[in-house]
Each structure stands twice: as structure tokens, then as C-alpha cells.
Amino acid sequence: MPKLSIEDLSLKDKRVIMRVDFNTPIDGNGKITDNTRIRLAIPTIEYILKHGASLILMSHLGRPKGEKDKKYSLKPIAIHLSSLLGKDVEMANDCIGKEVEETASSLASGNILLLENLRFHPEEENPDLNPEFAKSLASLADIYVNDAFGTAHRKHSSTYTIAKYFPKAAATGFLMKKELNFLLDTIFNPVKPFYAIIGGAKVGSKIKIFKSLITKVDAFFIGGGMAYTFYKAMGKSIGKSICDNEMIKVASSFLSDAHEKGVPVYLPIDNVVANDFRSDADHKTVLSEKGIDDGWQGMDIGEKTIHLWKDKLKAGKTIYWNGPMGVFEMDVFAKGTFAIAKTLAGLTATTIIGGGDSVSAINTLNLEGSFSHVSTGGGRVS
């Protein structure tokens, strides 16, 4: 059955509840350091308001583990969104409950209410704990819109269970529609050679990407913290580098599968390592074949890897990048991530960026307009 688009529904005088992905990086002062996901949701938000509806927005932020935690409040998001829209965004004290219901029911057409972090309730990530949670969210509105591409694959209360309460009034927003169309046209039918650059900290958070792409790509380039899990799976010493120990067997199995399918997997041939997780720590570059000594940890890909990968990536016609190559938040360990970003920005290939940290990196370099598609899929702390 074709998915309904927001344009297929009559919105006038309706209350719309929309799942967005506002899982954005916020610093210790409550400042949003990358607002890409918020900005990309605005076309759908403005369309709903323009067509005479009131709007209730809901999102998660970080991993508060089912408990209220001020650090993960969406209040900074409400303030920032108000600024972007040029109109007030009312902030709820929770996402369910009598007070929220009363506020939602009195919401006038053209007004916006942002619910508090969904993950303050354990039922959001585990709907079976209490099916009434999704029902309570659904009771707030007449229409449900999902525009949260980055979380749409999860069977959570706000993305999956809630939809059953809107059998003829559940639709996709413009961002979701754009993401799905681009994926179908490009990722699943890529112009070859098709390369995937995968970074970030943990194999477990990206294993679905590996499995879905292994029959499609012509080569993998694996950097970032997850590279050390693969090194360990290969029997290399990694010092005190981050390692997704539960995924070592999975990493080993993936390498074997890729070898059997004839898909090259490029791991860094050298790494920048430090004796502590600090920007001012002692650091040096070591060859991967020699391993990493005890007391040292990998922080970035090395110069030899950058040159090798830049040369190989030139042949790509479609390139997907998800995840940084190192601890790019620290300037001294940002060289690898920024080098990959600049390399891809200079290619004539179709380039797709996914993952909050990758997007943050290209925004830092003001390169967003140099890529074919910037996806909201792949989370920073999702």
C-alpha cells in the first residue's frame, strides 16, 4: 500500500502530532551546535501551519534511560525553533498526562506545542512495557505525521505503535519523503563504483548499515573508533583504544563475508594515537601493522591512510559516508575527518552524507552545499 503524504490529507482545523528527529548536539551551556535536523523539518512544519492546523511536535534527545534528566530536556530546542520560525513554540512539561492533554486540546490553529523528551518514559523505546503510552500520545491529535527519518526504522511507541491509532490519517512529511526517494533512486540503484565510508565509535550502532550495503558496494573504508574493533578481530594489538567487545565476532564474520564476496575492506594503515583522551595529550602516528602499544589509544586516521584513501576514492561514482574518522571535536585529531570531507566535496561523484557527526563536520567546514544529499539518518546520540 502506498504511503500517504501530508499533501494527501485535509489539515484545516485539525490537530497534527508529528514525530521529528531533533536529536541534536547541545553543549554544556545549552547551545545547539548543529541545527541541521531542526532546519530540515521546517518545510513540513510551515506547510502544516499554513494549511490551518495546530501542531504538536515530539522527539527524543540522547539516552536518558527512561528517566527525567534535565540534561536531555528539549527546552533549548523549543527556544531555537522559535527563533528559526519567528513565532513562539510552547514547551510542554511532559509528553503525556492531564496537563499535556489540556494544553494540546486548547492549542489554536497555527500554534505549536513541543512535547518534552519522549525517552523520559521507558515505554517509548519498549512499547510492550505499557501500550497505553502510545495511545496517550495518539489521543492528543487527529492526524499523525512521521518526518523523523533517522528514527523511522525503530519500533518505538512514537514511530511504530502510534500509527495504528491513525488508520487513514497517518502520513509522511516532506523530509521523510525526500529521504526515501533519494535512497530508492541512489543507494539501491547506485552508479558504480559505489563506495561506503563508515566511521564512528561502535560497530554495533552501524552493523545494519554494513549488512545492508555488503551486496551493493564495491569497497568499504572503515575508520573512526570502530576500526579498533576490527583490528582486534584480526588479532592486532589496540592498546587502550575504544573497542566494541561484544561485536568482535560480528566484525570478524563481516570481514570473512566481505572476502568471500570479493568486496575490499580498507582499514587505516596508520593511526594517530595519544596517551590520554585529551586534546593536549602526547600523540604520535603509528603503523597499523605494528599495532598500538599499551597505554596508547587511537584518535584519528594517519597521514598515509589519508593519502591512500583520497587516491582510491577518486574512482568512485557514488559514495556514502556515515561517521567521523576520529575524535574530530578535538582540533588536533580532526585532520582525518576534515580531509575526507574536503576530498568528497571536490569529487564529481554522487555523494551522500549520513550521521549527525559527519553532517556536523561538513557544516564546520561550510561544505554542506558541496554534497549531493545530506541525510538526517544515522544518529549522533540516537
Image (cartoon, helix red, strand yellow):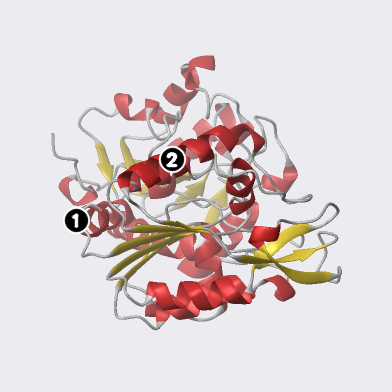
Is disc 1 placed on a helix, strand or loop?
loop
The C terminus - image quarter:
top right
Indicate the position of residue 342 as horizontal and vertical percent values.
48, 80
Left-right relation of 116 to 266: right
Estimate how packed mark 1 is, as few (under 14), some (14 to 19) or many (20 or more) residues with alpha carbons within 10 Å: few
Q: Quadrant of residue 285?
A: bottom right
Indicate the position of residue 21 as horizontal and vertical percent values.
47, 49
Left-right relation of 141 to 23: left
The N terminus - image quarter:
top left
Residue beneath label 1, please? 189
Estimate how packed mark 2 is, as few (under 14), some (14 to 19) or many (20 or more) residues with alpha carbons within 10 Å: few
Left-right relation of 343 to 73: left
Name the residue located 35 percent from the left edge and 66 percent from the top edge. 319
Q: Quadrant of residue 185?
A: bottom left
- Total number of numbered discs in the rendering: 2
Name the residue located 19 percent from the left edge and 52 percent from the top edge. 7
Residue 254, compared with residue 222, is above or below; it is above
Residue beneath label 2, please? 256
Name the residue located 23 percent from the left edge and 52 percent from the top edge. 188
Instruction: Residue type at mark 1: give it.
Output: Asn
Instruction: Residue type at mark 2: give it.
Output: Ser
Q: Marks 2/1: CA distance?
A: 25 Å
Is 353 or 28 nearer to us in this picture? Answer: 353
